[in-house]
Amino acid sequence: MADFLADNNLCGQTLLKLVSRGNAIIAELLRLADFIPPVFKLDNKFDQMKYGDILFDFNYFKGSEYYDNKIDSRPELQDLDEMFRENHIDILRRFYLAFEGIHKYVTDLNRFLEDLEEGVYIQQTLETVLLNEDGKQLLCESLYLYGVMLLVVDMRIDGPVRERMLVSYHRYSAAKAAVDSNMDDVCKLLRSTGFYVAPGARRPLNYPENYFKRIPISSNFIEMVIARLRSDDIYNQISAYPLPEHRSTALATQAAMLYVILYFSPETLHNQQAKMREIVDKHFPDNWMISVYMGIIVNLADMWEPYKAAKTAMNNTMDLNNVKTLTVNHNQKVGQLIKLLRQYLTEGTLTEEFVLDNIPKLMNCLRESNVNLRWLMLHTADGPWDANKKLRMMRDTMITESKYNPKMLFELLLDAAQFEFKLKEMFKKMLSEKQKKWELYKQESVERMIELGEVFSGTKPLTRVAKNDNLQAWFAEMAKQITSLNYDDSTAAGRKIVQLIQALEEVQEFHQLESNLQVRQFLLDTRKFLHQMIRTINIKEEVLITMQIVADLSYAWELIDTYTPYMQQGIKGNPGLVTKLRATFLKLASALDLPLIRINLANSPDLISVSQYYSSELVAYVRKVLQIIPQTMFSLLSQIIQLQTHHIKEVPTRLEKEKLRDFAQLDLRYEVARLTHSISVFTEGILMMKTTLVGIIKVDPKQLLEDGIRKELVQQVASALHHGIMFNPKAKTSELMQRLDALGAKMDGFVRSFEYIQDYVNIHGLKIWQEEVSRIINYNMEQECNSFLRTKVHDWQSIYQSPTIPIPKFQPVDGSINFMGRLVREILRITDPRSTSYIDQMKTWYDVKTKQEVLDIKVFSKVRQSIGTCGLTGLDRLMCFMMVRELQQFLRYMEHGVLREKSWLEMFGTLMKTLNPVRGLISNPGKVYSHYVTRANKMWAPFVNLVLKLGQMQLLRRQIANELNFSCKFESKFLASALETMNIGLLADVEAHYHDPSRPYPKDDNPLMFELASYLESAGISNPLSKIYVTTKRLPYFSLFTFLFVVSQLPKFQYLKTVGSMIGKLPKDPLDGPPLVVGTLTLLRQFHSETTDQFLALLGQYVRSSVESTAAGGKASELTPEVINVLAFLDDFTYYAGLSRQTVETHIPAYIFDEFKSTCQ
């Protein structure tokens, strides 16, 4: 039983692993609490309306069939439910495993207690385990951690949210849930308690004891654990706090455990006054605010209010006079301690000798500082207990009567942390050099004794020293005695050294050696070295351990955030303060020992993930505090840019002497220099911090500065883009150009400021700018595209979002999610084919009514200047998603609205028979075509707008590709040439492979094609009109359907020679020709090329038959308007599709096209 934690002790190892798992479960719950999908909260009307019918609480289990039938009866709910499952099943599984982990933990704890009782662990019972030091610690912790888990779950994940998550997981993984018998038990354990963290929320009746009772635990075990915590100092902390007034601090850890465990025994809290009195007198005589676990703070006066015995026991502690006295005493000490700490921290005070001679004094100062910090930080904390009027008034009275000053307390924290850090570093250094120094002092002492022996032998000349054999022999003996001192037996060596020092003092007095200055100096040096040996022996690791215990700051894990403003104000006033803050952060890092110590002892694989979580939380806090430096730098930078842009004149290359003073502007230039110096001072401040290991994460100050600058840049650029790209839908003229101009100027200001500052703060300005701006654009584009995807990309899955340098999300101001959507929709709005006309030769859209330019190629140049190449590429990709949605909608219309209607299929079949063979002519074409066009007219309404939208977006994408290609060739001609060459070469290889399959072809897992396509699109080396956007199956009569659609729409157009294309003929129903042509082309591109050939053949037959019919009527020389429109359509179609004239001439005789060209163009 001696070594309870030995590897071969099954009982100890089982319990240790259980406690280790408990700490890991709490870390996982805290981690997951930050990743609750907001939709499960149903805290806004939109979510309630959209997801209210598929998210259920535990009422679902009372009538699951009713709820499931409700979803199954509505296809749109089924679709939403399936989409919701695809998007959330992974995170739900993670939450469920954490919830199940709690249930498994308590089940395993109960099983362990049963095994212990039944004698499974030989010679070990509950009583014997509680007698062992490690055993009683682990048993108390095992119950305490279960209570903490339940409290953390209820505090961080609201009851209704838990229920919705569990029901969703149950529904979405039905097969697993059916096999998994734990599901019911997990639901019973974690059903809503009615507790809410929100300020002012009422505490449920009998909470949390009813919650803790959901899975019963042996009452005998609970009572024995409480008894052990009541009577013992289970962690032996009192030895680190010898003063009686520090006892409650020494027992703080087990006081927190008692607080939690007492809820498993509500009888004690309610009725056992003697026990409660004993507990309060020992653990809470002078404190009522405690930290339960990693900074979770509770107020006993508030939490024990409903319990009679507990409340009565706290009366003495909560007596107003006692409270005032305690507050005044602690607050008075703050000033005294700051003064004392600053004396010790004065440069040159903390030397090795001073530290070794004053260990008790220094440790007392350390204790007092930490005890005062703990008491004042906890007892002045805000929290839910402020809703209790009596407690709030008491706290206000405490603060006013004691003249509490949080800034002074913060200074005490800084000084105490710095003092601890210095002391620890010195002790670590002294411990590492302890043996080396001891041996050095010993060697020096021996050498001096040997030399003195030689002096008295008469062989070594020394002024006026007579030969003395006795002294010679005595000094030789002393040298032997000193040599025989053993470092490993420090106690015996210490006693012997004291005797040797006394002997050296006596020999000096009895043999009148004082008269000789040199001999006396040798004796003095030897005694000094022997003293140093005693000091060195007294350097013990126990001092470091005590410092570690005393310096614990885990209670402030969350509370420290209230002091962030003081930290930031301090840094703003004096950037050098960062060095003191470094010590504070390291002090806070000691809090990681609490959850990790058992995980480490158990050699658990959870060690890395848990330490990673707490370390990253702490590093995130360090970043938050130090973010004030980049913020201040950017505010100074904006002043510099203001001066450089608007006030300082550009000096010309040649300047008249008389005007030199005007251009000198010395005051302004001095101001720029002063501001620049301030920025470099801030940079120095953060770099003074040195590389620091925070938990298991190494924090490099240079990286910290760069990340801070990136974060501030992202905040400012994202804000500029959000506010810069907003449009007033009621504006008569588009605000697009002026918005882009203003945004371009702002972005140019950012670029210039970065160029200016990069050398002063030693960062790669251009690299940071390009990386962060492209990340912002890509992230916003990804979020905007989410609305088109079934499986959404969540923030935690996004490769563009970062927890370190987060991209802010803004509330949508219209139908779009962010500025990317707003920009695309504004461009689509102003180029609407119903109100504008596109002229390809000018690459410009004109307003149909006013004939004014609406959008030309300059707009895309402005877009590139304001949001860069990645912004243009993002717009292009977003339009692709919009087109895919339109095409999918088109296919749905076709499949459900056209091809399922028997009447339409019969009509298409009859028409096809009439038109076959397509190479031939049909008699009386006017009558045949008009009959079928009239019959099909009611079918076109949904298709017209869809085709026009497709065409409009394709034309815009052509413009974007053109702008991208132009800028790439202009600004990066080598990249453009390399990409074009690579593209041509790769296509040649692919063609060669299809001619001869033995030739190589990129494998499926080869990223070459995918990555090259990405580069080509970014460089504008692509043709949007030749792309396939959706996979389609063969649709019957699709070419005929498209032909009828085109022929039915063409009468609404007229061909204008001056414009060179078709424009709308009817003012009531304005349409534009190019979008119709390009939209039709895009539709046909999604199907096999045979469909396009068939479509062209049908149009060719239409032209030939119409011309033949006209000729038969005696008007051979004239082309009818219908034929002209079809020929104009075909002319544009071949131009946009990149087809040759010969392709059309296979269906229409060349002379007809020549006639069209000569008369109409």
Image (cartoon, rainbow, N blue to C red):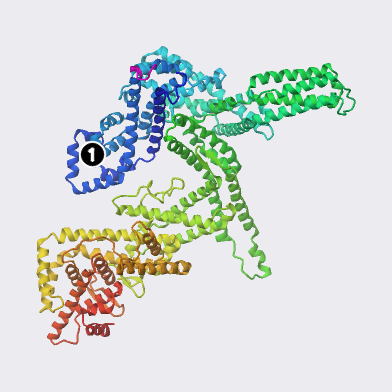
Can you say which quadrant of the picture contains the N terminus? Answer: top left
Q: Is 151 located above or below residue 227 in the figure?
A: below
Magenta-colored span: 116-123
Q: Is 812 located above or below residue 267 in the figure?
A: below
Residue 144 makes an appearance in the image: no
* Residue at image coords 55%, 17%: 244
Which quadrant holds residue 645?
bottom right
Q: Is 500 located above or below residue 898 in the figure?
A: above
Q: Which one is nearer the viewer's eye here, 796 or 667? A: 796
| 47 inside magenta stretch | no
Which quadrant holds residue 132?
top left
Query: Residue placed farthest to the top in the image?
Result: 274
Residue 100 makes an appearance in the image: yes
Which quadrant holds residue 612?
top left
Left or right: residue 143 versus residue 402 is: left
Q: Which one is nearer the viewer's eye here, 1109 or 564? A: 1109
Which amino acid type corresponds to the residue marked 1 in the rendered image? Ala
Percent across and percent down for residue 796 are 38, 46
Can you say which quadrant of the picture contains the C terminus? Answer: bottom left
Q: Which one is nearer the viewer's eye here, 625 or 651? A: 625
Percent across and percent down for residue 159 are 31, 33
Query: Residue placed farthest to the right in the image?
Result: 464
Disc 1 is placed on an element classified as helix
Percent across and percent down for residue 984 are 38, 69
Left or right: residue 777 versus residue 1081 is: right
| 119 inside magenta stretch | yes
* Number of numbered callouts drawn: 1
Q: Which residue is mark 1?
A: 175
Q: Main secondary structure of the magenta part?
A: loop
Q: Which one is nearer the viewer's eye here, 939 or 543? A: 543
Left or right: residue 655 versus residue 622 is: right
